[in-house]
Image (tube, rainbow, N blue to C red):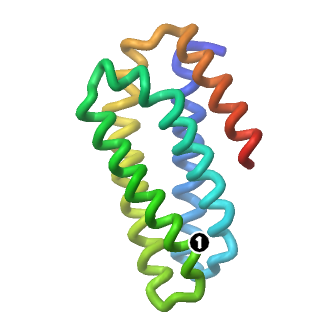
Amino acid sequence: MAKGDVYKVLKEDHENVKELFKQVIETGNTSKFPEIKKLLEAHMISEENFLYPPMEFVDEELVKKNKYEHELAWNKLLYLENEQGDKDWMENLKGLNNIILKHVQREENELFPKASEVLSEEAEEDMLKLIKEKKSESL
């Protein structure tokens, strides 16, 4: 493992979930929603447990914004899971996609570069190990 690998893994998650959203929105086929949900849940739990805590000491306001966006995403996921078949379901999925797109941009352009500056290679490696463990449990 090398310095920065943890951010590559998180960015891969971002790309994977963006592609899944694109497929569902373009085709109207909602069968990929469980996959979106699992990936987002594992990813958000990992960030909330392993990335955000050390970063709160570096940029509390930025972490607060990211946590708020996660909260919005959790609420949309809950709605989407419980209201499948609802006439507004696809619009809510698009709303979740928009939240995620904005969130991904903030993380990749602001949070990850700051984290890379302040976290040691050892801290990043530990975080990557924990994230991979969490994903293997969840997916």
On-image quarter of the N terminus? top right
Q: Which residue is mark 1?
A: 81
Label 1 Cα crowd, 10 Å radius (few <14 / some 14-19 / many 20+): some
Q: Residue at x 29, y 43 (%)?
A: 65
Residue 10 drawn at (x, y percent): 55, 36
From the viewer's perspective, tell me whether residue 128 is left or right of residue 118.
right
Q: Look at the picture and state if 33 lies above or below 42.
A: below
Q: Quadrant of residue 57?
A: top left
Which amino acid, mark 1?
Answer: Glu
- Between 12 and 96, the residue placed more toward the observer is 96
Number of numbered discs visible in the structure rendering: 1
Residue 14 drawn at (x, y percent): 52, 47
From the viewer's perspective, tell me whether residue 66 is left or right of residue 59.
right
Question: In the orientation shown, which residue stands out farthest toward the left?
Answer: 61
Q: Look at the picture and state if 36 lies above or below 7.
A: below
Q: Look at the picture and state if 16 lies above or below 113.
A: below
Q: Residue at x 30, y 38 (%)?
A: 64
From the viewer's perspective, tell me whether residue 125 is left or right of residue 63.
right
Residue 77 drawn at (x, y percent): 52, 64
Q: Residue at x 52, y 39 (%)?
A: 11
Q: Look at the picture and state if 139 lies above or below 88.
A: above
Q: Residue at x 65, y 26 (%)?
A: 130
The secondary element bearing badge 1 is classed as: helix
Question: In the orientation shown, which residue stands out farthest toward the bottom?
Answer: 87
- Between 67 and 119, the residue placed more toward the observer is 67
Q: Quadrant of residue 99?
A: bottom left
